[in-house]
Amino acid sequence: MKTIKVNPWGKGQGDFVLINEEDFDPEVHELYGEKKLSAKEKKAQEAAAKLLEETKAALKAKEIAFDDNATQEELQALLDAAV
């Protein structure tokens, strides 16, 4: 069974806690070493993800093929070129 490091959630747990990977819950755990996002950063990240999905949906509606791993900028360029 694979284990992962998460940030401690209580006193006396040290720098990190090992848990089973399958037990990881992003609502409860934070991966060790990852930067905790501020509310503003989290909101910006969510807005960027929403924009990406909206752009992909617009491309699909126009039947324009794209790479699922394309960046927002690449997808927007495809969409702009189709207008």
Image: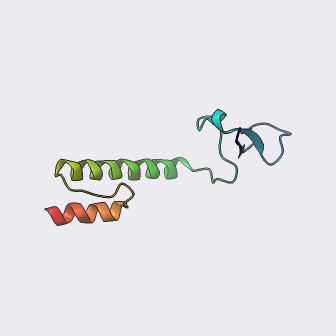
- Label tally: 0
71 vs 26, left or right, is left
Residue at 50 percent of width and 48 percent of height: 42
In the image, taking residue 1 as reference, residue 55 lies left or right, namely left
Outermost left residue:
83
Q: Position of residue 7 (x, y in %)?
A: 72, 45
Residue 25 image-quadrant placement: top right
Q: Residue furthest right?
A: 12
Pick the front one: 19 or 9: 19
Residue 83 vs residue 19, the one in the foreground: 19
Residue 64 position in % (x across, y down): 20, 56
Rendered location of residue 5, percent (x, y): 72, 46
Is 41 in front, or is 58? 58
Residue under the image location 18 percent in, 52 percent down = 63
Here the colouring is rainbow
Height in image: 7 above or below 73?
above
Image quadrant occupied by the N terminus = top right
Q: For this view, does 8 lie left or right of residue 56? A: right
- For the C terminus, the image quarter is bottom left
Image side of residue 46 versus residue 5, left or right: left
Q: Residue at the front extreme? A: 1
Which residue is at a point 26% across and 47% down the rendered structure image?
57
Q: Residue 6: where, in percent of width, then height?
A: 71, 44
